[in-house]
Image: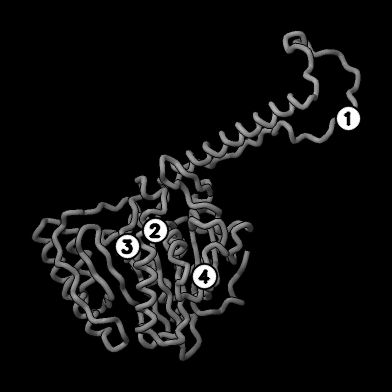
Amino acid sequence: MGHLRRTTHPRPGRESAPSPPRPQSPPPNAADEGPPRPATKPSRVVRVGTRSKAARTRKWRRAFLAALLTTAIAAPLSAATTHPRIPSPRPAALPALTATTLRTTYEANRADATEAARMAAAHGDSHRAAADRALAAPSRHLLTFDGRGAGEATEVLGDLARADHIAVLVPGSDTSLDTYARFHKAAAALYSDLTHRAPHGTRVAVIAWLGYETPATVSTTVTTTSRADEAAPQLRAFVRQLRTAAKPQAHLSLLCHSYGSVVCGRAAPGLAADDIALVGSPGTGADSAADLHTNARIWAARGSDDWVAHVPHVSARLFGTTIGFGTDPVSHAFGARVFDAADAGHSDYFTPGSASLANLARITLGETSEVTRV
């Protein structure tokens, strides 16, 4: 996708008062232009009306561009293929999530993933069978698992019950069980960085939360907040449950990528989180960080190679639906704490050794003074 250049046209009616005209020869085609218009009130009304019409045209052009461009918004997991009819057992009936029920929860979901792998293989879907089988490994810890359709899963890396700092990763579009390995890779990179960076005796945990049906990259849903509106109550409920399983004073951060930042924005009011970080965000559906109505610190970052910067940050009603996600989260107008992501591309925020990953780890650890700002 190429860069878009905005061409600025002079707006009639906004010029400063002209100085007295200098005598000059009439232009060659002056006769074709007719006599000059007097600067009367009726003329100014016409010019203001023209300006308003031009402003409306620009507004709708930007909205149309937003509808077109945001269809390309992709998390690191793109070009996924969903399987709406793939067979899988219904999710297990689980006890309330607490520190004492974690082992039971892990075992039940591991059994479900094992059965889902068997059913997928029998269905002839070897790719999904392999994905389910990987999640069923003894080393994997699943808080939730649902192998039906595109699938959902919530995985824990680390000792959740004893963690002092917890990061919840919220993914963007086209994230499913079929592409889960890439999402897991991002969570694992963060967990590795945290374990090396955390002070001695400090325990950490990372949760990969695929707890909603993400929109397809090329679809109408990816340009609206509809999927985020559906996901927000689920994310809020999960965070409440998480608080019952974790230490009472555990520091909790939400790290939200691409369309996942829209989900976090819609879930933010009343969300029991200490920090919310938005990376590669097309917007949150809110005009400012204050409009998220949360006590959490709001952070935002975008790498210089992330093409999402060229998506128009607008929000407009179109055919009864709101298109676009509003103010750019890294803009001064939004009011987030903007941190350095260097030259990260849209899929690079969790790359080991990157500036963005280091800063996300610092946010997770509550080392806010160490975060490199922009």
Residue drawn at x 51%, y 73% as measured from the top left: 275
Q: CA distance from mark 1 to mark 2?
A: 55 Å
Write down the residue under mark 1. Answer: 19
Q: Is residue 339 above or below residue 17?
A: below
Q: CA distance from mark 2 to mark 4?
A: 17 Å
Depth check, front residue: 106 or 94: 94
Q: Earlier in the sequence, mark 2 or mark 4?
A: 2
Say which element carries label 1: loop
Mark 1 against mark 4, which lies toward the viewer?
4
Residue drawn at x 20%, y 64% as measured from the top left: 147
State the mark number for residue 294. Answer: 4
The 10 Å Cα crowd at callout 2, few under 14, some 14 to 19, many 20 or more, is: many
Residue drawn at x 35%, y 57% as measured from the top left: 77
Say which element carries label 4: loop
Write down the residue under mark 2. Answer: 228
Q: CA distance from mark 2 to mark 3?
A: 9 Å
Q: Earlier in the sequence, mark 3 or mark 4?
A: 3
